[in-house]
Image (tube, helix red, strand yellow):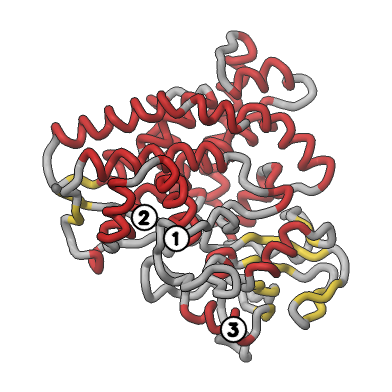
Amino acid sequence: MTDGVPAFPMTRRCPFDPPAELGELQRDEPVSRVKLWNGSTPWLVTRFEDVRTILRDPRVSADSDRPGYPHQSAASAARRNRVKSFINMDGAEHAAQRKLLTGDFLVKKMEALRPAIQRIVDDLIDDLLAGPRPVDLVPAFALPLPSLVICELLGVPYEEREFFQDITKVMISMDAAPEEAVKATDELLAYLSRLVEKKAASPGDDVLSRLAVSQLGTMTAEQIAGMGQLLLVAGHETTANMIALGTVALLENPAQLDLVRSGDAELLRSAVEELLRYLNITHSGRRRVAVEDFELGGQVIHAGDGIIGASDIANRDDSVFETPDELDVTRGARHHVAFGYGVHQCLGQTLARVELQVVYGTLYRRIPSLRLAVPVEELEFKNDMLVYGVHSLPVTW
């Protein structure tokens, strides 16, 4: 804490819970100043309804080019200065780019992928059961599943997975130097730009091919690549972390694991929503900046003030969720804000839900004796990354 203003982000004491200081702020000072890496002091919003307010309020902008926008790190600021995706745009600009992709992520289309996702999950589990023990579940299962799915959807060769997975680690690191982040961004953009140009000449049945055929000329190959980069990075990294972290949480809550293992489709849907609410892997908050003066939670927020919607503690608001610090897979938690809220709500949320439903409904049933191979205290959690999770997960059975 400096001059009475706490530093953000804070440190977790329990790997599954938001930092205790966030709960105190939610109770005593729900809209308050925090200090970031660069000395700026944006507003931190911690209550559920207030977070939803800033995520839907037209007086609040997601545009990362605006002065006062609270970047997560120097590397994050440098990356966004190099290429800005539609999640950091407003109004017509945001709507136009998002509209190009909404048809590819319709609920019906994502549900149609369920049998293919089930086959991938079963094949990966077959490989686990035939292989050595213990095994690190992250590279053996959690990371391949969403990587395979997003590669197939986008039209990115899965053989390139080590390349884009390694680059992603640099891009989402809180500790990366700005030049490292920009170099990684440039490398991935260059690769995807070349891929877009190839698909324009010889299209397949995939998102990048469709964008290349329909948009090249209106958009540059690099602009299309920028959209592909967002989908590729978010499409594998977030789900991979939910698979691994969700597994740890369930293994540490055996009664809840038993419910998931024996549950029907409806319970699995409920379990996915509860784990999304409970774990909140987007732990650095939803970043915004005010474009007009307005009042929130008894504070006057001025135009140009940075704002962080702390979705992790918002999803633990006891005015919305009863006993919010308990994991309860039977809870009706679909109204959580783990995917954001409003016009910027996560485009790929239906795909993530389907993937997680298949994983949670299959892995623990097919390997009922699955357990951690090391004490949970020895696991290294991703406090250093923009997306929270676990770096490795040794398991056995």
Mark 2 touches mark 3? (CB < 8 Å): no
| Earlier residue among tags 1 and 2 | 2
Give how far apart the Cα atoms at labels 2 and 3 are: 27 Å
**Residue 212 at what x, y percent from top left?**
66, 19
Amino acid beneath label 1: Leu
Is residue 365 or residue 195 the one in the foreground?
A: 365
| Residue positioned 59% across, 61% down in the render | 74
Pointer 2 residue: 245
| Residue positioned 64% across, 76% down in the render | 39
| Earlier residue among tags 2 and 3 | 3
21 up-or-down from 242: above or below = below
Mark 3 touches mark 1? (CB < 8 Å): no
Amino acid beneath label 2: Leu
Pointer 1 residue: 279
Pointer 3 residue: 27
Mark 1 touches mark 2? (CB < 8 Å): yes
> Neighbour class for label 3 at 10 Å: few (<14), some, many (≥20)?
few
Give how far apart the Cα atoms at labels 3 and 1 are: 20 Å
